Image (tube, rainbow, N blue to C red):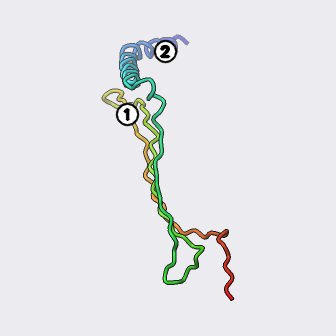
Amino acid sequence: MEADAERGARTRALYERLLAPVARQVDAKLADEAHSLPAQLRDMYDYAVGGGIESPFDFLGLFGPNWTSKSEYLYIDLGSTSGIIADPGGPAVSTTKVTEHIFRSGLNYHFNSPVVAKY
């Protein structure tokens, strides 16, 4: 039991001497980065922007008037996140930005198109 107490005391001393100052510096750096933005923008960083086009699709007369083709683009920005990475040279701050570029294309069939009777 005495060995466990001594091991715990050494672990606490090692943490206080080596890791605690680094953790305080990293926390201060993250806090400085967070407070560098205006208060209105700190929580408003996620957004999506996109556009597309849809047009009638009549490829070699094989498709009827109910068919359309579409193409779309979507950009999504989900902001960034920071974390601490354990490194042999000491802890480091890592910031990751989450963004997506999405391209879509396809064919649509419209069931509610007007029916024209031909006699």
Of tags 1 and 2, the one toward the viewer is: 1
Please, what is the three-letter code of the amino acid marked with disc 1? Ser
Report the quarter where the C terminus lies: bottom right
**For the residues bearing labels 1 and 2, Cβ distance under 8 angstroms:** no
On residue 63, the disc is: none
Say which residue label 2 marks.
Answer: 8
| Dot 2 alpha-carbon crowd within 10 angstroms: few under 14, some 14 to 19, many 20 or more | few
First in sequence: mark 1 vs mark 2: 2
Which element type, helix, strand or loop, lies under badge 1?
A: strand
On residue 94, the disc is: 1
Report the quarter where the N terminus lies: top right
Furthest toward the front, the residue is 119
Front in this rendered view, residue 15 or 93? 93
Q: Residue at x 51, y 69 (%)?
A: 69
Seen in the picture, residue 23 relative to 95 is either above or below; the reply is above
Residue 87, horizontal then vertical, whole percent: 35, 31
Q: Residue at x 66, y 79 (%)?
A: 116
Please, what is the three-letter code of the amino acid marked with disc 2? Gly
Front in this rendered view, residue 10 or 70? 70
Q: Residue at x 68, y 76 (%)?
A: 115
| Dot 1 alpha-carbon crowd within 10 angstroms: few under 14, some 14 to 19, many 20 or more | few
Residue 33, horizontal then vertical, whole percent: 37, 25
Seen in the picture, residue 100 relative to 36 is either above or below; the reply is below
Q: Quadrant of residue 22?
A: top left
Residue 23, horizontal then vertical, whole percent: 40, 20
